[in-house]
Image (cartoon, grey):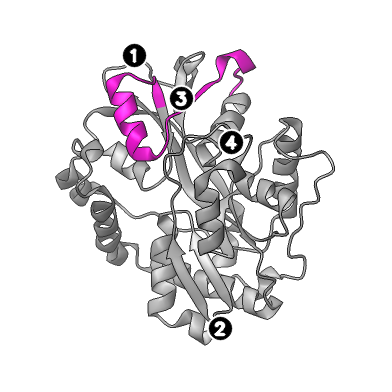
């Protein structure tokens, strides 16, 4: 039986997990980790939160420990026996419009629709981001479209005015001849667990990931081709990505640095919790449990610790 059964939502961390496994870092940290990748698909539901979506049952079954957006993590912990055991950052969240649209910046989308996947990352992050950009509540128009493939098709057909996506669809969108980028910003993420692992095992798991992060950051050019192959596999045989110029992507794409995973960021999680309470997404008396016994000294290598300052701050103010 494995120490941790891990299902990760974010595409970019497939590379990190693979490198950690291939280089024997989980074994070196004495952690038996069962790893998988998960992405929420399109759901039709009328529920009040992510727990009413079919994909919640899937990810909860596949991964007793998993990485999700910080907003989902707070909601999970408020309604289940899970704890937040790590904080990290996903790459940019990006808003695209059709290439022929007049919009040039996010301000041009006031009162216009943004296609999202309800109760997934885009649902929460876009609402918060637009509020922080000065949008009034009646100027925020979020429309549930579903998974990113459906969102690409929706904005190109005119069903929605814009779409919000994360990686790998950020990179695919940036090389899509029919799309135009009007906003990018950071995305906060967290790792939650219901497995109640030994603190040393949990610390070892995060340390193994960070050893892989250090390897990738030390050889970004060397890992670029491998990452592009992951992108090509993701887009293969999907009509929504037919307009992606892979020749240009292969020639121009540069893999960016990863930031290390670390012990739960109490200030950031607290700010996100306050925002979720204010919006009615979690109860006022919700107890948001975190792994207080974790220490970043045992999780983050010395040469990666200085990059902590690059982490996005919570903006739920």
Dot 3 falls on a residue whose secondary structure is strand
Label 4 Cα neighbours within 10 Å, binned few <14 / some 14-19 / many ≥20: many
- Residue 124 is marked as 4
Q: CA distance from mark 4 to mark 3?
A: 12 Å
Mark 1 and mark 2: span between their CA atoms?
53 Å
- Which residue is at a point 51% across and 13% down the rendered structure image? 111
Q: Residue 243 has which mark? A: none
Residue 229 in the image: state x and y as whole percent.
Answer: 24, 58
Neighbourhood count class around disc 3 (C-alpha, 10 Å): few under 14, some 14–19, many 20 upward:
many
- Give the distance between the C-alpha atoms of the residues marked 1 and 4, in whole angstroms: 26 Å
Q: Residue at x 42, y 39 (%)?
A: 42
Task: Provide the residue designation for mark 1.
Answer: 102
- State the extent of the magenta-drawn residues as a range: 133-162
Where does label 2 land, which residue? Answer: 29
Q: What residue is pinned by disc 3?
A: 114
Depicted 12 relative to depicted 6: above or below: above
Q: Point out the tag, 1 or 4, that comes first from the N-terminus.
A: 1
Of callouts 4 and 3, the N-terminal one? 3
The answer to whether any part of residue 302 appears in the image is: no
One can see residue 171 in this view = yes
Tell which of 292 and 258 is nearer to you: 292
């Amino acid at each position: 039986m494995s120490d941790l059964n891990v299902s990760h939502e974010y595409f970019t961390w497939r590379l990190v997990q693979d490198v950690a496994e291939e280089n024997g870092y989980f074994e070196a940290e004495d952690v038996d980790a069962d790893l998988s990748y998960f992405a929420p698909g399109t759901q039709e539901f009328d529920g009040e939160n992510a727990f009413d979506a079919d994909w919640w049952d899937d990810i909860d079954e596949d991964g007793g420990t998993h990485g999700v957006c910080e907003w989902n993590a707070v909601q999970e912990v408020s309604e289940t026996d899970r704890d937040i055991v790590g904080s990290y950052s996903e790459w940019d969240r990006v808003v695209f419009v059709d290439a022929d649209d007049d919009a040039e910046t996010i301000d041009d989308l006031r009162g216009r629709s943004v296609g999202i996947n309800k109760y997934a990352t885009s649902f929460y992050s876009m609402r918060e981001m637009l509020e922080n950009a000065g949008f009034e509540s009646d100027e925020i128009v979020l429309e549930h479209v579903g998974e990113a493939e459906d969102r690409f098709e929706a904005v190109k057909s005119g069903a929605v005015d814009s779409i919000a996506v994360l990686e790998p669809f950020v990179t695919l969108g940036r090389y899509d001849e029919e799309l135009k980028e009007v906003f990018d910003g950071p995305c906060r993420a967290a790792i939650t667990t219901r497995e109640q692992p030994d603190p040393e095992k949990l610390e070892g798991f995060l340390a193994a990931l960070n050893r892989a992060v250090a390897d990738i950051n030390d050889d970004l050019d060397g890992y670029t081709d491998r990452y592009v192959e992951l992108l090509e596999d993701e887009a293969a045989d999907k009509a929504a990505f037919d307009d992606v110029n892979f020749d240009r992507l292969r020639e121009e794409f540069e893999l960016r640095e990863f930031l290390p995973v670390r012990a739960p960021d109490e200030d950031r999680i607290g700010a996100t919790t306050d925002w979720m309470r204010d919006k009615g997404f979690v109860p006022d008396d919700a107890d948001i449990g975190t792994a207080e016994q974790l220490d970043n000294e045992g999780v983050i290598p010395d040469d990666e610790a200085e990059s902590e300052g690059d982490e996005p701050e919570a903006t739920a103010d």
